[in-house]
């Protein structure tokens, strides 16, 4: 079975994740078929960058999202677009709509606004 799940990247205690398509038997950070997105929960607001067309393709051929990925897909509207794709709308129209929504959200900063655990414990030098 093919799964869409998160793959942890980043430094110790500073996680960010890639959204990958992988076999369900592969380890969390092991082999994968394709990288379809990026998720960083440490930015304000949270950064989610997803290739809608590839996500819709994999979901339409039977890939199952993990629970965290399913929540992300619902949050950005991909689950609703999948339902509409199954009802007969074209994938081009749906990906264009997703691109429009992404542009409306505005640019997302990739800089982390939350302090690292190491910096949070250090008192200021004032």
Image: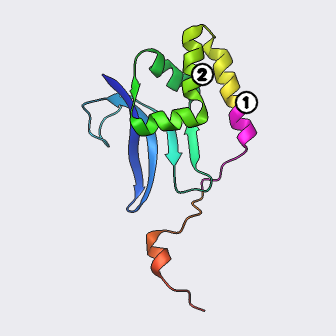
Q: Is residue 31 magenta?
A: no
Question: Which quarter of the picture shows residue 6?
Answer: top left
Measuring from the top left, give residue 86's x and y in whole percent: 54, 11
Checking the image for residue 19, the label placed there is none
**35 sits left or right of 47 in the view:** left
Which residue is pictured at 57% across the width and 42% down the height? 48
Q: Which residue is mark 1?
A: 100
Camera-side residue of 88 and 99? 88
**51 sits left or right of 5 in the view:** right
Which residue is pictured at 58% across the width and 50% down the height? 46
Q: Is residue 103 magenta?
A: yes
Q: Which residue is mark 2?
A: 81
Foreground disc of the pair 2, 1: 2
Task: Tell me the magenta residue range.
Answer: 101-110
Question: Which quarter of the picture shows residue 76?
Answer: top right
69 is higher (above) or lower (below) than 61: below
Question: Which quarter of the picture shows residue 81?
Answer: top right
Measuring from the top left, give residue 75's x and y in whole percent: 57, 37
Which residue is pictured at 51% across the width and 26% down the height? 55
Quick check: marks 2 and 1 in contact, CB under 8 Å?
no
Which circle's residue, 2 or 1, is located before the other in the chain?
A: 2
Measuring from the top left, give residue 87's x and y in whole percent: 58, 9
Outermost residue, bottom side: 126
């Amino acid at each position: 079975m093919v799964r869409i799940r998160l793959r942890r990247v980043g430094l110790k205690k500073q996680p960010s994740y890639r959204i990958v398509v992988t076999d369900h038997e592969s380890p969390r950070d092991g082999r994968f078929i394709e990288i379809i997105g990026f998720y960083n929960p440490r930015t304000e607001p949270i950064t989610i960058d997803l290739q809608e067309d590839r996500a819709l393709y994999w979901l339409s051929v039977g890939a199952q999202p993990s629970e965290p990925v399913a929540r992300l897909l619902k949050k950005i509207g991909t689950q609703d677009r999948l339902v509409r794709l199954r009802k007969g709308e074209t994938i081009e129209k749906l990906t264009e709509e997703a691109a429009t929504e992404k542009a409306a959200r505005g640019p997302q900063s990739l800089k982390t606004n939350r302090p690292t655990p190491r910096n949070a414990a250090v008192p200021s030098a004032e």
